[in-house]
Amino acid sequence: MIFTWNIPAADGRLASEELLVAFDRGRAVRVLICPAWFDEANRLRRFTIEVMRRLDASGIDGFLPDLPGCNESLAPLENQTLAGWRADMVAAAAAVGATHVLAIRAGALIAPATLPGWHYAAQSGPKLLRGMIRARTIAAREAGMAETSEALMAQGREQGLVLGGWPLGAAMIGELETAEPGLAPGQSDIAQSALGGPGLWLRAEPDESAAQADRLAAIIAEDVGVSEG
Amino acid sequence: MTTLPNIDSAAGDAALDTELKALLADVLGLDPAQASAFGPESGLFGHLPELDSMAVAGLLTEMEDRFGIVIEDDDVDGEMLETFGGLLAFARAKLDPR
């Protein structure tokens, strides 16, 4: 279930090896998961794997790669860029022979445009940044320090910024300021309302929902026309 | 997206109260019955250990989305976050700034 995939050296970056959770039985439909980011990745990890289990039971292979700099990755997060992660997801798709992509939340910002698939509750770069900057200003205020969103953003653009414990480089912050998820041909949005419950990324404590995982997997299985078996 | 009825009316006020409770239930993982027990003095930030700065940031960002408001840095203070009543009064003022 746990494999590795390799990112080729490109654009001055070193080649690296990253972990991958896979349900691979060599079936026709092979879904690459572009996971949620940062805090949301933790809160949605269990949900994501549960969706993959259900896809597996429906005859669909699933592949969940680590984003370089996240989860078990040894790469420094502050060196990562949006453009880099986009290229990495293309490399991951090629490495696993993906036929479809399921992008979750900010994962929609890096979904390979060449694959058909789904954006689940897509999150924009500005909204992601806004939430993370706000968490930092609230924590600072509680600690008796005054930090403003504007000053933090200016600092972030210049020299990068640690937000919620995640060190983001200046390039990543600059890219996220204007990053909007866009549907490529063959890709469609799945809104949270389609899953019949509140988004699990909202939860202060990580939680799960079998009903929501059932629903998301069923939408995908229905879309690709794979019957159980 | 939820469209709130005119909050001038008592019915609108009740709708906002219900919406805000539902949002807190989503963040705190409560069922609607538990959330409906929130009163004006129910403690939030600083009272509920799971409601840390990251969760509060998520809560405010979701309020922006669901209520169609913009929350500035300066809006966020201890009073507004400390109790359910404070948060409700803040949301009401944002929706009807008079």
Image (tube, rainbow, N blue to C red):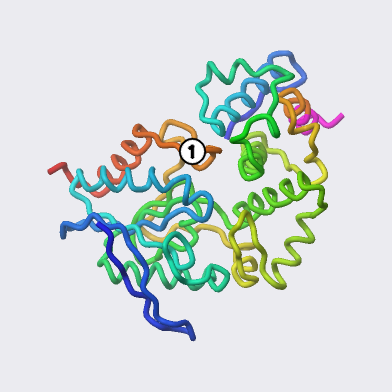
Would residue B22 be found to the left or right of residue A110 on screen? right
Residue at 73% x, 26% y: name it.
B83
SS at circle 1: loop
x%, y% of residue A49? 33, 47
The answer to which of A68 and A88 lies nearer the viewer is: A68
Q: Residue furthest top?
A: B10
x%, y% of residue A37? 50, 55
Residue at 59% x, 53% y: name it.
A128
Q: Quadrant of the N terminus of chain A?
A: bottom left
Residue B35 appears in which quarter of the rendering? top right
Residue underneath mark 1: A199
Q: Residue furthest bottom?
A: A12
The answer to which of B37 and A211 lies nearer the viewer is: B37
Would residue A74 be found to the left or right of residue A151 on screen? left
Q: Quadrant of the C terminus of chain A?
A: top left
x%, y% of residue A18? 37, 68
Circle 1 marks a residue in which chain? A
Would residue B56 be found to the left or right of residue B25 on screen? right
* Span highlighted in magenta in the image: B90-98
Neighbour tally class for label 1: few under 14, some 14-19, many 20 plus, Cα within 10 Å: some
Q: Is residue A171 magenta?
A: no
* Image position of B43 with respect to A204: above or below: above
The answer to which of A27 and A17 lies nearer the viewer is: A17
Residue A46 appears in which quarter of the rendering? top left
